[in-house]
Amino acid sequence: IKPTVSPTSSMSDVVQTEEWMEAKDYDVIKKNNLKIVKHIEKGTDKNLCTRGLESMMPALKDKQNHERQMAMKFVIQEQKRQRKKGIYDPTRIAELYRQANLECKFDAAERAELD
């Protein structure tokens, strides 16, 4: 059996209402996610899954922002260096960016192992 997704134009209003999420559904999900984050931050439940909630957790969000800023800083510095020397080496820029993101890659691999 091959799953298919029907275009909304072929759905009745009733089916669309039953199948598609509304703003109130997103609000419920967001509130539940915030509850999970609060429990984790308090340490009251270590068995809760945080997958996808990292951006809602201040400590992890700060770490992600710092790593992103450092990667951008390395790339911009390398671009300036290359411009000053009159060269253009996108491979070198890509390599610096890859190196700057190694920790993120390892973190993601560790999370994937837990899944």
Image (cartoon, rainbow, N blue to C red):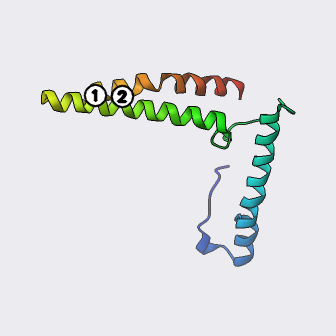
Quote the CA–CA distance across marks 1 and 2: 6 Å
Q: Residues within 10 Å of mark 2 (few under 14, many from 20)?
A: some
How far across and down, in percent of the image, does residue 19 sit? 72, 65
How far across and down, in percent of the image, does residue 28 sit? 78, 58
Q: Residues within 10 Å of mark 1 (few under 14, many from 20)?
A: some
In terms of depth relative to the viewer, which is nearer, 16 or 111? Answer: 111
98 left or right of 93 in image:
right
Q: Is residue 30 above or below residue 110?
A: below
Residue type at the position of mark 2: Phe
How far across and down, in percent of the image, does residue 71 sit? 42, 30
Question: Which residue is at a point 45% across and 35% down the rendered structure image?
Answer: 69
Q: Are marks 1 and 2 in contact (CB under 8 Å)?
A: yes
Find disc 2 in the rendering and name its residue.
74
Residue 78: mark in rendering: 1
How far across and down, in percent of the image, does residue 26 sit? 72, 59
Question: Which residue is at a point 76% across and 48% down the rendered structure image?
Answer: 34
